[in-house]
Amino acid sequence: MNHPVFSIAVIMERRALANRWQAQTWEAIGIVADPGDAATPRLLLQDDTRAQWLHGGFELKLYRDEAENYYLNLSAAQPCVFVVWRMEEDLAVPKFVTVSYGEAARFMDASEQVDNVPMPRDMGDWLGDFVNQHYKPEPKRRSRPPSFKGAKRG
């Protein structure tokens, strides 16, 4: 199967903290279409309180066996993109992006740093088309609890 791909870049932000134990914090704050110059992270802005870096070269690939997890993401109040990142020297570097609740949960279970950012509408439409084509919910089966099996009504 040919896997649909959406090329993106991740924006990471470093914010200064007024905290005696931690001087700064990092988080993924957004995604944009990949500008195509992914060779090195690019500083977007910097002032006294924050700095933002653009990291390109990421591809969101969709897989049929994750269709239910994509559906769960789309049915949430705010669909999102999950960004897995690690510190490398003094820079937070994204390592993986996904729109699957299951994949994100597996990374969190492995103690990875995972942030979520809002999913752009065009990506939501693209993902929705994939989910509509490949996700077929299991029919709900109602079964009687074991305590009712064999009971006869008189």
Image: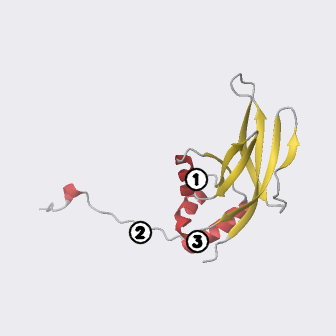
Please name which of the two marks, 1 or 3, marks the residue nearer to the observer.
1
* In the rendered image, the vertical position of residue 41 relative to residue 37, given as above or below: above
Residue that carries the numbered disc 1 in the rendered image? 104
Amino acid at dot 1: Ala
Left or right: 85 in relation to 42: left
Secondary structure at badge 2 equals loop
Q: Alpha carbon of mark 2 to alpha carbon of mark 3: how far? A: 16 Å
Q: Who's the residue at 83% across and 63% down the image? A: 36
| Mark 1 surroundings: few (<14), some (14-19) or many (≥20) residues within 10 A | many
List x then y, in percent, for residue 89. 74, 40
Relative image position of residue 138 (x, y in whole percent): 43, 68
Depth order, front residue of 130/153: 130
Where the C terminus falls, by quadrant? bottom left
Say whether marks 2 and 3 touch (CB < 8 Å): no
Q: Residue at x 69, y 68 (%)?
A: 5
Q: Secondary structure at mark 3?
A: helix
Instruction: Nearest to the eye among marks 1 and 2: give it.
Output: 1
- Amino acid carrying label 2: it is Pro
Residue 145, quarter of picture: bottom left
- Does residue 128 appear to the left or right of 58 in the view shown? left
* Mark 1 and mark 2: Cα distance apart in space: 26 Å
Q: Residues within 10 Å of mark 3 (few under 14, many from 20)?
A: few
Q: Residue at label 3?
A: 132
* Neighbours of disc 2 within 10 Å: few (<14), some (14-19), many (20+): few
Give the amino acid type for the residue marked by disc 3 in the picture.
Asn
- The residue labelled by disc 2 is 139
N-terminal of the pair, mark 1 or mark 2, is 1
Q: Is residue 117 left or right of residue 110?
A: right
What number of labels is visible? 3
Tag 1, which secondary structure?
A: helix
- Looking at the picture, tell me which residue is in the foreground, 103 or 69: 103
Outermost residue toward the front?
89
